[in-house]
Image (cartoon, grey):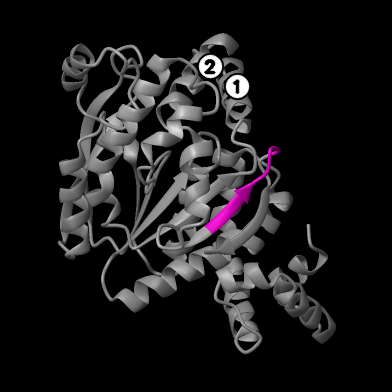
């Protein structure tokens, strides 16, 4: 942990330490720009971050112990470097809009979308904002509707790819929140129902929402030129694979009205997309160790390859890095799940 973090927590920061913190904050211009920090406002931003750190600390400590099951002192650095300035940035965006903020979060399996939403909710609560953490998964079609869908297209063996969601339902919910309606009925999905096939569960009634954190494995992803599948990376190999990928790309166009409801988009970008396979294996191993049912390594590989065949990260994520009109902020995820470069587009 940074030695000066304890000084900030104890409210006993020397002038020398403060200069060191200021220099460290401005040392990475791309990261400073991403969080709207300049040489002019750096002291003000750091003062605000310091106060926020102290106010969120009890809840964050509890979160590390119960949900994250991670070393608290190690996570303090991530809290200071990433989550606190990101929370402040979202709060500033909300104030400038003068209406609820719809923040998209895009990340493939294992990039930490859920954790990010949980921590940001803690921070934003301290800043006085009511936050809704919502997933693209909550928009899955009902179990019965997906059975019909499977008859229409037997390739859709698992929920997840484009075409398995109720887009109109999502549009309706986001529009109600954007318009500032007091109470909104938000659908929820229980993946454990029907032996893991999943189905809608009791919806949630939310009130006075200020910020929506809308996350998903292809939230905000845009369709690409179909010719890209002619020489696609594995596991898109056979003509059948390419036909399926082209169909999923076509289905993606139907989601564009939903993405248009987003005010901004954060991309959690894995430096190596293949890491998500290892991350999924780790998650399943933890489930088995906890006495829960989990998939075997071969089942996990089939599962992950299915998603790569539908929307391959190499084909769909890289174009976003060249499209500032799509994503606003990129947070790189290293193979060991630590955070790499952070920059705005």
Query: Alpha-carbon neighbours of circle 1 within 10 Å: few (<14), some, or many (≥20)?
Result: many
Query: Can you identify the residue that label 2 sits on?
Result: 300
- Per the image, the residue denoted by label 1 is 281
Decide whether residue 174 is among the magenta residues: no
At x 16% / y 64%, what residue is drawn? 179
The magenta-colored residue range is 330-336
Q: Which residue is located at x 30 percent, y 64 percent?
A: 210
Image marks 2 and 1: residues in contact by CB distance under 8 Å: yes
Residue drawn at x 71%, y 70% is: 28
Left or right placement of residue 314 versus residue 332 in this view: left
Q: Is residue 13 above or below residue 313?
A: below
Q: Is residue 253 visible?
A: yes
* Crowd rating for badge 2 (residues with CA inside 10 Å; few <14, some 14–19, many 20+): some
Image mark for residue 153: none
Kind of element beneath mark 2 = helix
Mark 2 and mark 1 lie on one chain; the one further toward the N terminus is: 1
Q: Quadrant of residue 326?
A: bottom left
């Amino acid at each position: 942990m940074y030695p000066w973090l304890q000084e900030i927590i104890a409210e006993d920061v020397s002038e020398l330490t403060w200069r060191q913190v200021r220099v460290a904050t401005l040392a990475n211009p791309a990261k400073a720009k991403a969080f709207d920090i300049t040489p002019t406002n750096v002291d003000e931003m750091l003062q605000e971050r310091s106060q926020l750190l102290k106010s969120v600390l009890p809840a964050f400590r509890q979160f590390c112990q119960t949900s994250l099951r991670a070393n608290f002192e190690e996570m303090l650095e991530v809290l200071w470097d990433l989550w606190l300035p990101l929370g402040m940035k979202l709060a500033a965006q909300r104030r400038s809009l003068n209406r609820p903020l719809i923040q998209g979060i895009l990340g493939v399996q294992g990039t930490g979308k859920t954790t990010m939403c949980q921590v940001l909710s803690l921070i934003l609560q301290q800043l006085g904002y009511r936050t809704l953490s919502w997933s693209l998964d909550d928009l899955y079609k009902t179990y019965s509707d997906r059975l019909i869908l499977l008859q229409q297209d037997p390739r859709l063996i698992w929920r997840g790819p484009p075409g398995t969601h109720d887009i109109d339902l999502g549009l309706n919910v986001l529009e109600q929140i954007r318009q500032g309606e007091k109470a909104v009925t938000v659908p929820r999905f229980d993946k454990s129902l029907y032996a893991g096939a999943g189905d809608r569960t009791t919806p949630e009634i939310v009130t006075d929402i200020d910020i929506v954190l809308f996350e998903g494995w292809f939230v905000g992803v845009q369709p690409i030129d179909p010719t890209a599948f002619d020489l696609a990376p594995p596991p898109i190999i056979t003509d059948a694979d390419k036909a399926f990928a082209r169909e999923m790309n076509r289905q993606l166009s139907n989601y564009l009205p939903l993405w248009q409801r987003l005010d901004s988009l954060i991309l959690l970008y894995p430096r190596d997309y293949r890491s998500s396979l290892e991350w999924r294996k780790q998650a399943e191993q933890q489930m088995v160790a906890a006495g829960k049912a989990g998939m075997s390594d071969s089942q996990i590989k089939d599962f992950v390859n299915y998603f790569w065949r539908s929307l391959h990260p190499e084909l769909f994520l890289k174009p976003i890095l060249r499209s500032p009109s799509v994503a606003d902020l990129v947070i790189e995820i290293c193979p060991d799940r630590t955070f790499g470069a952070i920059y705005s587009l």
